[in-house]
Each structure stands twice: as C-alpha cells, then as structure tokens.
Amino acid sequence: MSSRPEDVILHTQADAGSFIVDGARQRWIMDLGPDDYDLPGYFDHGTDHHRSGPRWRYYRTQAAGHNTLVIDGRNQIPTARAPIIGNCVDGHRKWAVFDLSAAYGKPAGSIRRGAALVGRQVLIQDEVGLEIAGTIVWSVHTSAEPVSVARSAARFRMGDDRFVVRILEPEGARFQLGFPPEPRSFPVADVRQLHGLSVLAGDAIRISELPRRADDKGERAAGALIRRLQIVWPRGTRRLSVLFQPDYDDDDTAPLVIPLNEWLARRPVRLAPYPRSEYRTHGDRDAEGVPPVDAGLLASLPAEMDARAGISL
C-alpha cells in the first residue's frame, strides 16, 4: 500500500458511522458500494480533500447514500476521523461507541453513535449534544421487500425470511419508506479518460450513475430495487434508538434504552420485555397480523423530505 495520502483517501466515501446488518441467510441492511469509475471527476476530492470536488455529487459517495446521519443537508467531512471511544464484549452482549463529531465539523463528543449486538438483535443508538441544531435525518438502505411500515415499526421479507426494524426512542419518531434519488447522467469532457469504451474523440457521451439496485451474482446494480428507510428526528430530540431484528421470531424482548454514558461506564445492555402495543396500530391487518404497506410510502420521498436528505456541496 502506498504511503501517499492522496492514494490512501482515493476511494474514501462519506460513510462515518455507516453499518450493515446480516441475518442467517440474508443481508438486510446494505452498503451500496462504489459507483461507475467513469463518472466525470469521480476521484476528484477537491483541493481541500474534504467536500468541494465533483466526487461528492454522486449519491453512493455521499453521507446520504450510506446508513448514517445527515445533518442540515450537508455532506460529512470524508477525511475526518471517527474514533471508537469505548467498547465491551460480555458473552452475547457486544457494543462499541463511536465519536462522529469530527465528520460533521462539530466539537468532540457532540455526536456519538453506539452499536450493540445483543444475541441476534442489533441496536443503533445516536446521541447529540445541545450544540447540534437543525434537521437531522437518519437513514438505512435495504433491498428487502416491504411488508408493512406503521409508525415506529417497519417489517420486511426476503423469501421465507423476515426482518423487523423498531424505533425504541423517542416516542414521536416515525419511519418513512421511499427510494433513493433517481440516477443522474453527466457529460464526459475527455473521452480518452474512459475505461474500456471504444469512443472516437469528439463524440458526445454521457455517463450515468449506477441504477439504485443491489448487486446480483457478481453483476453490479442488476438485482432488487434498493429502498431507503429514514427517520427525520423530531425537533428537540437528543437521542434516537433503533432496534434491528433479523430472522424475527416474534420475541417480545428488546434492549432497554439507556444513555451512551452508561454504556461507556461498562454497564451491560440488558434485555427487557417491551409491550406489544408499542409496535401495533389499529386498522386493517394483512395475513401476518400487521398493517399493510401504504402504497404512498413506496413512492419517492416528498420534495421537502428529499431536500432534507440531500447534500449541499
């Protein structure tokens, strides 16, 4: 590996705090991976190596294209460090806490993400300090088929496998399910820079971002449609706790929501009963006893939500 900084960060994406979730047979929460290397300026990070280059206009490189937070519609600082400030392994309980503050240009300790593996369940807990204001958007990406999205619970399936995502805190937070922005195409100024394409000099050509689809059998972006599950933090919220349950078997236990400071004090993340009413709503039910997916939720995100989730360069 080259020691030159420009080589080290060549493939960097704005993905601090991003994660994936696997079950026994399926990948439920996914990373979209890189985009087409022939996109103009794809490896141009900008003169400050932060977020001024054309690389950061592509969805798969942005914070919005990862399973992390977008604050006030701005991209992360891709070269920032996101150190682990605490971790523990205790039998079936494993956790780590990351300080994401520098990725958003904020003081140390002001934006933290905890990730805990409790048995087969994954808990992601984000906490922000009083100095963090504005709109915060939490999002993840999945190629699973939605079964239902109802307030604080979202259910998915792949074949016979099931997956549930639940908001544990705050009470007023709600899921929204939509699709990532449509791929865009860009003109290529110098066709000599293209890889593996026979194009005559002077020919006009445009390169498109990859489709918003999962990879399939080694073929890029040729599989199932990718959906984006997001939460716009209610105003004034300082903590968001979300539970992922792969291969869900209708177990009613869930981790108690405790502050990250208590995680760091080495207190274990415990399991405790959660009342079913937290995850059920009245109204029509499908064959599995859960509300059906609202067709409107499967459309692209409303313009105002798309703007909140987008990136300002």
Image: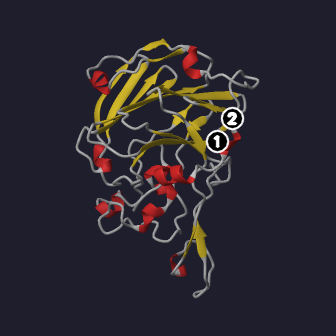
Residue 62 in view: yes
Q: Position of residue 304 (x, y in %)?
A: 52, 52
Q: Residue at x 29, y 59 (%)?
A: 3
Residues under numbered marks 2 and 1 in contact, where contact means CB atoms less than 8 Å apart: yes
Q: Farthest residue to the right: give it.
A: 287
- Image quarter of residue 293: top right
Q: In the image shown, does 142 or 134 lie closer to the viewer?
A: 134
For mark 1, does the 10 Å Cα neighbourhood hold few (<14), some (14 to 19), or many (20 or more) residues? some
Looking at the rendered structure, the secondary structure element under dot 1 is: helix
Q: Position of residue 96 (x, y in %)?
A: 35, 30
The image position of residue 215, as x and y in percent, is 63, 50
> Which residue is the site of mark 2?
293
Position of residue 193 in the picture relative to residue 223 (left or right): left
Residue 117: x, y in percent? 45, 25
Q: Which residue is mark 1?
A: 297
The residue positioned 68% from the left and 49% from the top of the image is 223
